[in-house]
Image (cartoon, rainbow, N blue to C red):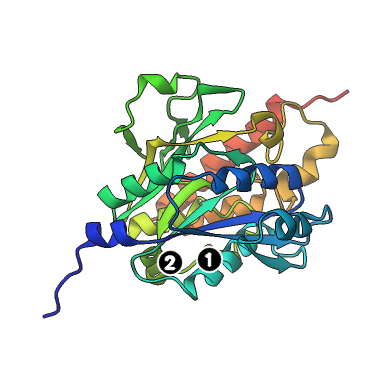
Amino acid sequence: MGCRPNLTEAAGQGKIYIVVAVFNRRTLTERLLHCMNGQSFRRFEIIVVDDGSTDCTAELIADQFPEVQVVRGDGTLWWTGATNVGIRHAMDRAGADDAILVINNDLEVSPDYLENLHRQWTSMPDTLIGSVAVDIENPDSIVDGGTIVNWWTAKERKLNVGQALSQFGTAYSAPVSWLTGRGTLIPITVFRRIGLYNAKHYQQCGDPELPVRAEAAGFRLVVSYACVVKTHTKTSYGVNVKERYTLRDLESYFFGVGAYTKLKIRWFFAYDTAKNPVRFVSFLLFDLARITGHFLLRLQLR
């Protein structure tokens, strides 16, 4: 019988491959890359997948960040496909002890971010580790502390939103139901065991499904409050939801490629995460009622 590797020791020796899928928003990408340049932890590589940007994002990176690897797309990849391209690029050179950090470009981080993330990874090697998100204009205010989902009623409970980050110690971590692209560290062994993000079912908004699949395969999901990302709340808000809708928004809300509320996405998410047919039907019906109610409550007929 072969010896089982010391996972904690392996995680401590590993490299982090940072995958960023971008489409325009050049200024935000530049800010994130400047943040990564200033990290105290240095065992990392950055892979930016530029899916057809028209604002010279790739040229900016080549000029200011020559160490960053840029993979070009033609504009048809969307978030999920672009992220998978970056992950495949990393996996071609990554070892079994390495990990991939999936992070959106509308975030900024402090110089100790990767160091803190690496420390958590060392102590929790069989875990997908998400970051706590705070408002960049008020860095002590939690915007996203993790999500707990009732898999029967589709009800989502957001953890600690609006609370002060300072009241939680850096040792605090919250078990969660899924993780997003807001800074999630995923051991390379996860992708080699369960595959990549599901780009067939989710062109956009494919980030929560893979962690659910990983948990079913035996990995843990946590959000670490030692690992903090600062989100441009005003810039990010409105990507998938709005404060108010009109009837003209009906098509984009239920059928738009980039919409979290796209009916096809909601159907497949219920199907892909259900443990049995009854739970699939229950989750789907409650979920459709939830997103429809969200639209109707914010609908302005004038």
Taking the image as drawn, is residue 124 in sight?
no
Distance between the alpha carbons at the discs numbered 1 and 2: 9 Å
Outermost residue on the left side: it is: 1
Outermost residue on the right side: it is: 302
Q: Point out the image quarter for the N terminus.
A: bottom left
- Is residue 139 depicted above or below 271 in this figure? above
Confirm or deny contact between disc 1 and disc 2 (CB under 8 A).
yes
Residue type at mark 2: give it.
Answer: Phe
Label 2: few (<14), some or many (≥20) within 10 Å? some
Camera-side residue: 300 or 169? 169
Camera-side residue: 114 or 146? 114
Q: Name the residue under label 1.
A: 87
Q: Is residue 128 left or right of residue 77?
A: left
Residue at the spot 33% in from the left edge and 36% down from the top edge: 173
Residue 191, numbered label: 2
Task: Count every numbered label the image shows and give the total.
Answer: 2
In the image, which is nearer the foreground, mark 1 or mark 2? 1
Q: What element carries label 1?
A: helix
Q: Is mark 2 on a helix, strand or loop?
A: helix
Residue at the spot 59% in from the left edge and 28% down from the top edge: 136
Q: Position of residue 25 (x, y in %)?
A: 75, 46
Camera-side residue: 145 or 120? 120
Q: Position of residue 185 (x, y in %)?
A: 43, 52
Q: Quadrant of residue 302?
A: top right
Label 1: few (<14), some or many (≥20) within 10 Å? many
